[in-house]
Image (spheres, rainbow, N blue to C red):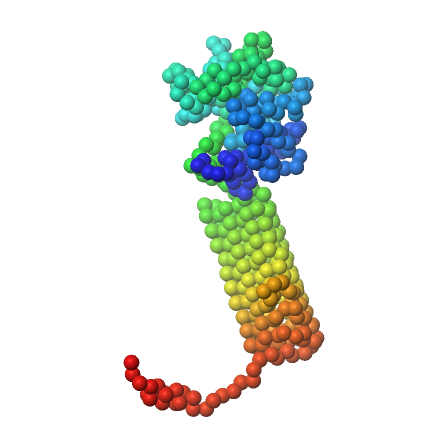
Amino acid sequence: MRSRLPKVLHQICGRPMVGWPVAAAREAGLGQVVVIGGSERELEDHLPEDVSLAVQAQPRGTGDAVLSARDWIERSSTVLVLSGDVPLITSEVLRELADAHASSGAAATLATMELEDPSGYGRMVRTPDGGVERVVETKVPGDATESELAIREVNAGVYAFQADPLLDALGRIQPHNAQGEYYLPDVIDPLRAAGLAIARHQLEAPEMLLGVNDRAELAEVRAIAQRRIHRRHLLAGVTIVDPASTLIDTDVVLGPDTVVEPSSFLRGATRTGRGCRIGPLTTIIDATVGDDASVLHSYLQSCEVHAGATIGPFAYLRPGTVLGAGAKAGTFVEIKNSDIGPGAKVPHLSYVGDAEVGERANLGAGTITANYDGRAKHRTTIGARVYSGVDVSFVAPVTVGDDAYTAAGSVITEDVPAGALGIARERQTNVEGYAERVEKGAQKAPSR
């Protein structure tokens, strides 16, 4: 990956790569889920609380990795083994594999697939009667012969085992390969030597087991995952006008009849209600948008938008913002850590930070809440039905009562009582003949 970040922590549609097989395992209803990672424990903070981390002290191959998790394996159980860099596996495939394994009575069942180009995958070598003889790795020259490299059926890297024979076999495998590693498929030999059956379960959709070894493959897998996410929403009644230009993370929830216009990006834990209109050219991250709200050409992060609100174009709603039902944040409006009441309007060219704005208040163009004095943040409270003229600054902490007015161009530094008009500006003075005096002064000035 040519990265400081561990491979399985690279993001795919809002979830680290390792999180995809973990999610599939949990959705399949499997029992305890254990992730095997390195001694640095870099994966620990990226796993759900009910998922355990087993530490592989040295990177000595997949067989040694599974053995590192032996303390979590009950000998009477069935064990499914997945790869952390195979993120497209689904819960349906895992259930099918578990069912096939249970019905076969085998000690091990290997998922396989046939590929037009099997490069990089371990090849399935069969017995004369069609059973599984062994898996030949092909990671480096010398692991496989030319005839073995010609085999198109490959090991998919997903397995089902009976735990007791698996643990015994893991203790008997040897690193007889060019890399000197303990390969998990090498347990086949000791299992067969013990007279136990080895089954195979061929998968019909090879894309589910595409692995990721570099950023080019990561991009390919991400594109497939995104198509799946789009299809899920489309089938649930969401309109995505141009899927090719739309990015939607896996945990995003969209209500029926919501329309997502082109070049929109919905990330993280974003939720929308029914009948919303999102975009075009809109980014929403970890935000909640209520029914029938509209977000046009804007950027929202960690905020809450209630039903029927309208946003944009060119609005920026920052963390902690709550936009009430039917409220408006208009063109070139930035709101941060503020509660905008139902039906209130911040139409355009304004900054509202650390403020409470009452219902049906109307803040004129160029409204600013001066919330920071150089040392601390302070809040502004603007009551219900307040009408603020254009180009007004509220210097916090300050309170404007219900039904009050503020005159255009005012700098409000003191509280305005309910129903009052606050005026805080210099009285206008006109200097007659000023332009003529300027012109005469220019003519007398020496040339340079």
In the rendered image, which quarter is residue 91 located in? top right
Q: Residue furthest left?
A: 448
Quadrant of image for the N terminus? top left
Viewer can see residue 217: no
Q: Is residue 211 above or below residue 280?
A: above
Position in image of residue 229 (x %, y %): 53, 41
In the image, taking residue 80 as reference, residue 153 lies left or right, namely left
- Identify which residue is drawn at 43% across, 21% down: 138
- Identify which residue is drawn at 48% across, 47% down: 246
Q: Which residue lies furthest to the bottom in this view?
A: 432
- Identify which residue is drawn at 41% across, 22% down: 140
- 91 or 389, nearer to the observer: 389
Q: In this view, does 117 lie above or below 192?
A: below
Q: Is residue 72 above or below residue 335?
A: above
Viewer can see residue 72: yes
In the image, taking residue 114 as reference, residue 347 lies left or right, namely right
Position in image of residue 198 (x %, y %): 56, 14
Position in image of residue 44 (x %, y %): 60, 36
- Identify which residue is drawn at 50% across, 35% down: 7
Quadrant of image for the C terminus? bottom left
In the rendered image, which quarter is residue 191 located in? top right
